[in-house]
Image (tube, rainbow, N blue to C red):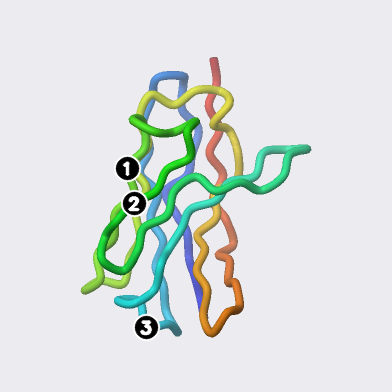
């Protein structure tokens, strides 16, 4: 299983970024996919997830600002982020499970300056 995240960067508060995750080695169309993030000194936390049928779940902290989506044909997961705040600064990881085992991508850094 390989999860390759990209799209991170440095933006000012109020800015936007779109993260992308390319997946291989899994049956993408039937897999629940998720985005997690980890800020320095903090635990990794769920940002958003999306089921195989496209039903999303969001953390309260990003509800209304982030949108998770997927393209099953291209085997890609996306996270559109808007109204970014300094508290959103973190490494963002793509996540899935296969046969009960969790898999993580290498992460992409998002830095938001005030």
* Front one among 34 and 80: 34
Helix, strand or loop under label 1: strand
Residue that badge 3 annotates: 27
Query: Which of the two labelled residues, at mark 2 and mark 3, occupies the earlier sequence position?
Result: 3
> Does residue 91 sit above or below 24 in this rendering?
above
Q: Are marks 2 and 3 in contact (CB under 8 Å)?
A: no
Residue that badge 1 annotates: 67
Cα separation, mark 2 vs mark 3, equals 19 Å
Residue drawn where x is 29% and y is 54% of the image: 69
Residue placed furthest toward the left: 73
Q: Position of residue 78 (x, y in %)?
A: 34, 54
Numbered label attached to residue 56 = 2
Helix, strand or loop under label 2: strand
The quarter of the image holding the C terminus is top right
Residue drawn where x is 39% and y is 73% of the image: 31
> Does residue 107 sit above or below 39 in this rendering?
below
Q: Residues within 10 Å of mark 3 (few under 14, many from 20)?
A: few
Query: Which of the two labelled residues, at mark 2 and mark 1, occupies the earlier sequence position?
Result: 2
Give the total number of marks visible in the rendering: 3
């Amino acid at each position: 299983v390989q999860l390759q995240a990209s799209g991170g960067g440095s933006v000012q508060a109020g800015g936007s970024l779109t993260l992308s995750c390319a997946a291989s080695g899994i049956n993408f169309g039937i897999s629940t996919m998720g985005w997690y993030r980890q800020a320095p000194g903090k635990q990794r936390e769920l940002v958003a997830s999306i089921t195989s049928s496209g039903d999303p779940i969001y953390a309260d902290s990003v509800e209304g600002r982030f949108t998770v989506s997927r393209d099953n044909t291209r085997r890609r997961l996306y996270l559109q982020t808007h109204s970014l705040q300094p508290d959103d600064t973190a490494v963002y990881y793509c996540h899935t499970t296969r046969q009960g085992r969790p898999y993580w991508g290498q992460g992409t850094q998002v830095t938001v300056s005030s």
